[in-house]
Image: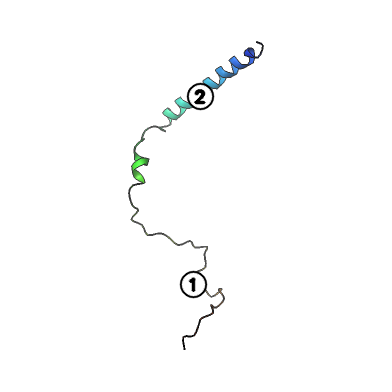
Amino acid sequence: MSVLYLLIPLSLVLLGLAVWAFFWAVNNDQFDDLEGPAYRILFDEDDPPRTRPDRPQDNDATLPPRDQENDA
């Protein structure tokens, strides 16, 4: 029975935090566009994929030469 004296105020504090978080999200426009992200995944990107600049390219002089098989 004495544990209720701890659990009831704790649950009220958690409820208050949840209500505060909800109103914070509403005031910061977190719920404005609910359908946009769902449709955005369906559209293709027109930009070609970019290469990462930290990767060495095939024509880079720092790479060791590749072993090539002779077809002769």
Determine the image quadrant of residue 3. top right
Which residue is rendered at x = 51% and y = 73% of the image?
A: 60
| Residues at marks 1 and 2, CA–CA distance in whole angstroms | 55 Å
Q: Colour scheme used in the picture?
A: rainbow
Residue extending farthest to the bottom is 72
Tell me the kind of residue under disc 1.
Answer: Asp
- Residue 32's spot in the image, x, y percent? 37, 33
| 37 horizontally vs 72: left or right | left
In the image, residue 31 above or below residue 3: below
Find numbered disc 2 in the image and state the secondary structure of the residue it sits on.
Answer: helix
Which residue is rendered at x = 37% and y = 59% of the image?
A: 48
**How crowded is the residue under tag 1: few (<14 C-alpha within 10 Å), some, or many (20+)?**
few
- Residue 72's spot in the image, x, y percent? 47, 89
Which residue is rendered at x = 33% and y = 47% of the image?
A: 42
Badge 1 or badge 2: first in the primary sequence: 2
| 48 horizontally vs 4: left or right | left
In the image, residue 43 above or below residue 68: above
In the image, residue 28 above or below residue 10: below
Find numbered disc 1 in the image and state the secondary structure of the residue it sits on.
Answer: loop
**How crowded is the residue under tag 2: few (<14 C-alpha within 10 Å), some, or many (20+)?**
few
Q: Which residue is mark 1?
A: 58
- Residue 15's spot in the image, x, y percent? 52, 20
Determine the image quadrant of residue 40. top left
- Residue 36's spot in the image, x, y percent? 34, 40
| 54 horizontally vs 43: left or right | right
Disc on res. 18: 2
Residue extending farthest to the right is 2
Tell me the kind of residue under disc 2.
Answer: Ala
